[in-house]
Amino acid sequence: MRTSFSHILLTSKLLAALMLLAACSNSDPGIDEEPFDVEGRGVFILCEGNFNAGNATLSYYNPTTRAVENAVFQRANDRRLGDTGQSISLRGGTAYIAVENSGIIWAIDAQTFRVKGQLTAGQTEHMSNPRYIHFLSDTKAYVTDLYAPYITIFNPQSMAYIASISTQQPAAFGYCSTEQIVQYGHEVFTNCWSYSNRLLVLDTERDALADVIELTGWQPKSMVLDARGKLWVVTDGGYETDEDSFGDNIPHLYRIDAATHQIELDQTLDTDEGNVQLATNHDATVLYLINNDIYRMSITDNHLPVRPFIQAERNDRGIRHKLYGIGVDPHNGDIYVGDAVDYGQSGVVRRYNSEGSLIDQFRVGINPNGFAFK
């Protein structure tokens, strides 16, 4: 049964307040904060956890030694990361983590994992459930939102709220979501995922909505920009079940010219069993797509390959694991894949080389969904 938007938003803010109190208090009284001092290359792995469980965690992996440290945020700060870790971004020696259901953005030192600053929903005019962060400069960043029809602008150095941009989007079942952000020139594109088929174009010089692109498929889930200035977008098709029906459950892959906003390619995909995601290699000439398995294609191709590049693991009953996140190391092209297994147990990260050969695998937290490379 669906509830009203006001009820959803009130519940969300109450949960965010409770989670923030939990996050800002010591989760393990009497246990000292652990010192960390990691140098050189490394990979942050954000584990989303389970909704309303407050069990999001952060892991750190050394690709040279293959050593992994789990729950480093909690261990370094003696406090929980929060509820539903949505995304992680690195800039200037600082890692920024959006914890969606807690309504908080953490800024942590990328070498010590210690908290340097934070921005909470209560410090802003409209931010409710932060999703993804995009840096326009050292002192200006956008953050998208699950419920609020606004993009929040903040200063990533001071973690101070600056302003909000109205997306002018009507609520659908209580959601006005904006998700990932990619930039082309002075414009940025963001996808409206929940119950929508729209991409929004924002003018970063005016901090205002400039255009809307409507797709034939529902729920644009992930986006990347390639080396030719083409925007690739994958949709998950919505949800078609016995109890709840929205969309047709048919994913689409789009190629859009970022300069003209015109759709150039629209390919339907096999029905997704888990989570669709896009990533590119270091020079944005190769695409990687999670759609049950992992597919690879050149940006000059006009059709996704029939056979997967990497196949998802299967359990002893032949059921495919749930691939949940993907990231490509810009240094050497290694591919990191987050395997949620069954969404309930500790997830697995698998590291492949650029040819798809398995290099390493290790356990992390629940539902690994994001990677940031230091």
Image (cartoon, rainbow, N blue to C red):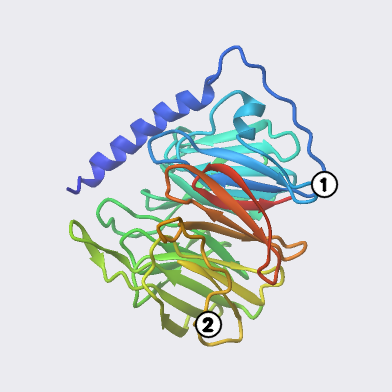
Q: Taking the image as drawn, is residue 313 in sight?
A: yes
Q: Residue at x 48, y 34 (%)?
A: 55
**Residue 374: image tag:** none
Q: Is residue 310 left or right of residue 191?
A: right
Q: Which of the two residues, 84 or 364, is positioned nearer the viewer here?
A: 364
Contact check, label 2 and label 1, Cβ < 8 Å: no
Q: Which of the two residues, 23 or 91, is positioned nearer the viewer here?
A: 23
Q: Residue at x 41, y 42 (%)?
A: 128
Q: Is residue 91 left or right of residue 309?
A: right
Whole-number angstrom distance, CA of label 2 to CA of label 1: 36 Å
How many badges with numbers are in the image?
2
- The answer to which quarter of the image holds residue 115 is top right
Q: Residue at x 37, y 75 (%)?
A: 215
Q: Taking the image as drawn, is residue 291 in sight?
A: no
**Residue 312 x, y percent position in the rendering:** 51, 63
Q: Which of the two residues, 295 or 95, is positioned nearer the viewer here?
A: 295
Outermost residue toward the top in this view: 30
Disc 2: which residue: 305
Disc 1: which residue: 40
Q: Which of the two residues, 259 or 129, is positioned nearer the viewer here?
A: 129
Q: Which secondary structure lies at badge 1? A: loop
**Residue 306 x, y percent position in the rendering:** 49, 82
Identify whether 82 is placed above or below 194.
above
Q: Classify 10 Å Cα crowding around label 1: few (below 14), some (14-19), many (20 and above).
A: few
What type is the residue that disc 2 sits on? Pro
Of callouts 2 and 1, which one flags the residue occurring earlier in the amino acid sequence? Answer: 1
Identify whether 247 is placed above or below 20.
below
Q: Tell which tag, 2 or 1, sits nearer the viewer.
A: 2
**Residue 186 x, y percent position in the rendering:** 60, 67
Q: Which secondary structure lies at badge 2? A: loop
